[in-house]
Image (cartoon, rainbow, N blue to C red):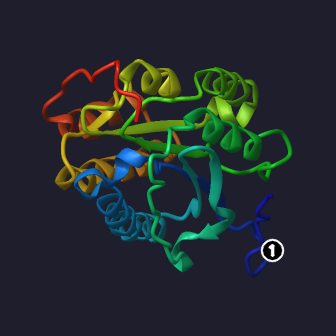
Amino acid sequence: MTVENSLMPGGGISRRSLHIFILADCSGSMKIDGRIQSLNYAIASIMPNLISWEKEQEQAEIFIRAIAFADKAWWHIETPQQIEHLNWIPLTHVEKGLTSMGAAIRLAADALSPGKLEPRALRPVILLITDGKPTDVEEFDIGLKELFSFPAGKASIRLAVAIGQGANFNYLNRFINDPDIPVLVAENVDQIVVKLTAATLAISKMSSVGSNRKEVTEQIILPALNSFSQADDDTIV
């Protein structure tokens, strides 16, 4: 589904659409230590930051979509919602749910396939948040191949937030596919808001015309990393 830009009074073109896709892990392990509640709080908390950024500049009009994933992936918010009118509906974990990350990426890829975004849209943003690694590895490989095969998918700004020690950096780095952008790590639930706030600032900076991703990483993402520890490759969910 596309969002058409409207004409401003006097015949000018309105601001360009910036589509942000949130891919949220709802697997069984997200109930541990209240992770899913913290994630909902964090997502609700970062929205005012994006609204403020949208009002401060004249280029972008932000639209939010969200995909949840556990045993399967599904649209949590399928129709693009203007951020200033968004009412975030809390996510819930799936008891003993797996981590169908690949299926979630495939849903996002389909939404970014040719003809799905308006021609003047800014580079879309995909924010992946997880505490595990994909249990659908073949789907993960297919999803990345599909995402990178589409111009909008290849050009997308991809950020990942790893919650706890169960997330696998190998898969998240493959998703980001940019050596200048590291995975943001939330070591505990209290850090989820901090890391998502950093991701939000990075989104606003990277979405600006003429932005330098490496500079944004050095100024925003790297300071937010604090401690960095390799995740356990054997953890599934």
Q: Secondary structure at mark 1?
A: loop
Q: Amino acid at mark 1?
A: Gly
Tell how many labels.
1
In which quadrant will I find the N terminus?
A: bottom right
Residue neighbourhood size for the residue with mark 1, other residues' Cα within 10 Å, grouped as few (<14), some (14–19), many (≥20): few
Residue at 22% x, 52% y is 189
**Residue furthest to the right:** 115
Does residue 163 sit above or below 56 in this rendering? Answer: above
Q: Which residue is located at x 62 percent, y 37 percent? A: 105
**In the displayed image of the protein, which residue is found farthest to the front?**
96
Residue at 74% from the left image edge and 24% from the top image edge: 149
- Estimate the x, y position of residue 157 in percent, counting from the top left: 53, 38
Q: Which residue is mark 1?
A: 11
Residue 38 versus residue 83 in the image, above or below: above
Nearer the observer, 196 or 84: 196
Place of residue 47 in the rendered image (x, y in percent of width and height, measured from the top left): 41, 67
Name above or below for residue 218 compared with residue 20: above
Q: Is residue 36 left or right of residue 70?
A: left
Quadrant location of the C terminus?
top left
- Residue located at (69% from left, 37% from top): 106
Q: Residue 51: which quarter of the image? A: bottom left
Q: Position of residue 160 (x, y in %)?
A: 41, 37
Residue 75: horizontal and vertical position, in percent? 65, 57
